Amino acid sequence: MKEMGLAILGCGRHGERYLRHIAAGDVAGARVVVIQRRSRELGESLAARYAVDYVEEENRALEDPRVQAVIVASPPGLHAQSLRRLEASPKPVLCEKPVAGDLAQLAMVSPAQRDRVMVAQTLRYHPTLIFGRSRRESLGPVHFQRWSQRLEPSDLSWQRDPALAGGGSVLLTGVHLFDQIRWWWGRTPDSVVSDQLSVQGHPLENLFTATFHYRQEERIVSAEVAKCSSSRCARLETVGTRGQCFVDYLGGEVRELRATQWEKIEAPPARPTLPAILEDFLAFAREERDNPIPLEEGVETLRMAEACYLAHREGRRVDLTEIPGLPSKEAPPGGIPR
Ligand SMILES: NC(=O)c1ccc[n+]([C@@H]2O[C@H](COP(=O)([O-])OP(=O)(O)OC[C@H]3O[C@@H](n4cnc5c(N)ncnc54)[C@H](OP(=O)(O)O)[C@@H]3O)[C@@H](O)[C@H]2O)c1
């Protein structure tokens, strides 16, 4: 298999995870040729450690003839700018979640470039969640489900800056849950109510609940993120008419409840999600398969996030039809940023 040359834009903490897996040979047929980040000092030392090139300017990475595909791992408020830069040297892109700071930023990206984007919804590759989803049929009709992530506060300064982060926990962590909800139930929910708080002096919301309704299916799906604890857990609880399933996807455990009897279900062993998502991305970049997670899926998670913000701001239930998607296929205004 011919090796595909990759560039990583915004090669910070998460970008280095991609770099580490590829350097360790965890992904067949991939080689990082160049990384980009703001800090020259950190960039050069990272590049030396992994024997790749470093550039400070995104355009230099994008114009490098060895680069055939790109990973965007910068703060969300910068993603759309990078996608627009790529219009001048089109390549397939694996773009981190959330795919942009908001829908308006994404609307500036040309339709042709949008088609080249796969969204890095890494939880779709999580073995415990894949397994938990496969148990769905045994639960009978499901009328209630609860997703939660309770985490430590982040020490990344951009996560406190609305222009770079796009939002707080609803956007940065919520989109993981929103994508899972869509993936489980096959479509975007119909409406939402949401409560949000900024606690411990955080400038953006770091605690929220969102209660989504699927009208036809008589189903409520609740999502909750609390990024204000010194402890950490991530859970999924699914309530079916025949029983309940509890997935602890950080701990890799699945338990089921039938009547009053608990049973531990053997789940597949843990494995990192990045090599699996990279394998799918490379197959897409080589045109061996369709886009596994097209940009439209990222748009839907942004619609869910924006509906949560509106619901909280106005203190009411918001119908998802109130949040339009992207304008369709006409060319966006403005030139390509250098
Ligand atoms: N899919 C997942 O599970 C997952 C997990 C973690 C993160 N992510 C996503 O990955 C992206 C990066 O997150 P991270 O945790 O890697 O953050 P990070 O460690 O802060 O990395 C951000 C990178 O962007 C660069 N950057 C460029 N302009 C910047 C600016 N104005 N302010 C701050 N940084 C700037 C930074 O360069 P310098 O450091 O050189 O300044 C750094 O290389 C985000 O979109 C995040 O949502 C996804």
Image (cartoon, rainbow, N blue to C red):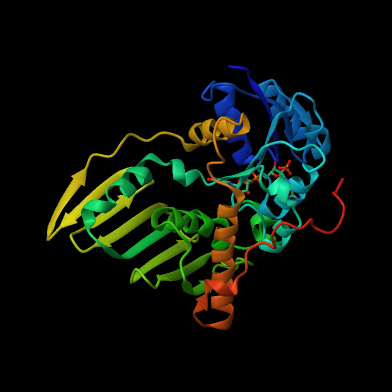
Identity of the residue furthest to the bottom in this view: 315
**Marker count (numbered):** 0
Identified at 27% across, 47% down, the residue is 254
Q: Between residues 153 and 61, which one lies in front from this camera angle?
A: 61
Identified at 49% across, 55% down, the residue is 179
Q: Which quarter shows the N terminus? A: top right
Query: Looking at the picture, how far across and down is residue 278, in whole percent?
Result: 55, 33
Identified at 70% across, 57% down, the residue is 106
Query: Looking at the picture, how far across and down is residue 159, in whole percent?
Result: 64, 56
Query: Looking at the picture, how far across and down is residue 332, in whole percent?
Result: 79, 57
Identified at 54% across, 77% down, the residue is 311
Q: Which quarter shows the C terminus? A: top right
Image position of 256 (left or right of 236)? left
Identity of the residue furthest to the front in this view: 329
Quarter location, residue 286: top right
Q: Between residues 332 and 127, which one lies in front from this camera angle?
A: 332
